[in-house]
Image: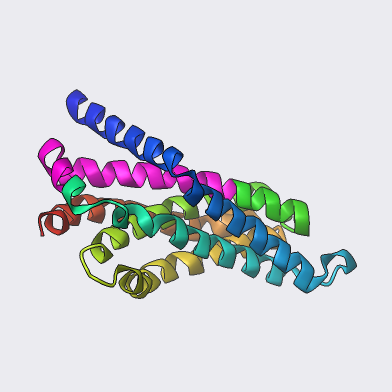
Amino acid sequence: MQQSLSQIGTLVAKEFRLEWRQRYALNGMLLYIVGAVFVCYLSFNARRGQLLPIVWNTLFWIIQLFSAINAIAKTFVQERAGRQLYYYTLASPQQIIIAKIIYNIGLMLVLSLLGFAVYAFVLGNLAQDWQLYLGGLLLGAVGFAASLTLVAGIAAKAENSATLMAILSFPVILPLLLLLLRVSKNAMDGLERSASRDELLSILAIDAIVLALSVLLFPFIWKS
């Protein structure tokens, strides 16, 4: 058990070092978030208070969704076949997918919190219960990371991986996104947190199911 955790930690550290060496990818994602927020600001002329709360919420989750897809799509595509074969001799498929998910969760948490900070600073924070809003955002980041990591692993086995990932990710992400929109809408309206309990439990269940499926199914994908 200790050796397995050590190998997972080594793989996670490798992902961070690889991302740090290729900082242009991270810089590109940050530029996308800041650019999208700035375009929204110019388009809706927020200074005059023309941005409705429901529009504010919808735009934010659209930015988060595309940020997640752009950030995680390269998870397996950037790995060459020779390097994947080398990993196959060093670690088990379960360790590899867990390390990928942990790294992508960390990446999504950073991008989500940074995106919310920039979005709230530029367009104002219209959420009455911002703690609940952040809670849903963090759960959504975990769900996006786990779901898209598994989909990226499946799509990487195909020739046109980008198109396949877009097709496969939609039915996986849609239920999670609908629940997140309900929770964030309740936070925008300042409702009691008990009103969002069922949605939060459903999001937690989806996150747990996706994590379990990733560990169970990825070995078959990896061996192919």
Q: Position of residue 133 (x, y in %)?
A: 62, 53
Q: Residue at x 16, y 38 (%)?
A: 91
* Up-down relation of residue 13 to residue 168 (above or below): above
Image quadrant of residue 183?
Answer: bottom right
Q: Is residue 124 left or right of residue 105?
A: right
- Nearest to the observer: residue 198 or residue 68: 68
Q: Is residue 47 magenta?
A: no
Residue interval drawn in magenta: 85-113
Q: Main secondary structure of the magenta part?
A: helix
Q: Where the N terminus falls, by quadrant?
A: top left
Q: Position of residue 201 (x, y in %)?
A: 44, 55
Question: In the picture shown, does residue 164 fall above or below 132?
Answer: below
Q: Can the viewer see residue 97?
A: yes
Of residue 1 and residue 30, the one placed in the foreground of this image is 30
How many numbered callouts? 0
Quadrant of the frame with the C terminus: bottom left
Query: Can you see residue 135?
Result: no
Percent coordinates x, y for residue 170 in the rendering: 39, 73
Q: How is the image coloured?
A: rainbow
Q: Residue at x 73, y 53 (%)?
A: 120
Residue 87 counted in the magenta span: yes
19 lies left or right of 82: right
Instruction: Work out which residue is located at the far right of the displayed protein and give it.
Output: 48
Q: Position of residue 187 (x, y in %)?
A: 65, 58
Extreme residue in the top direction: 2
Between residues 157 and 7, which one lies in front from this camera angle? 157
Examine the rendered structure and indicate whether residue 99 appears above or below residue 37: above
Residue pictured at 33% horizontal, 51% vertical: 208
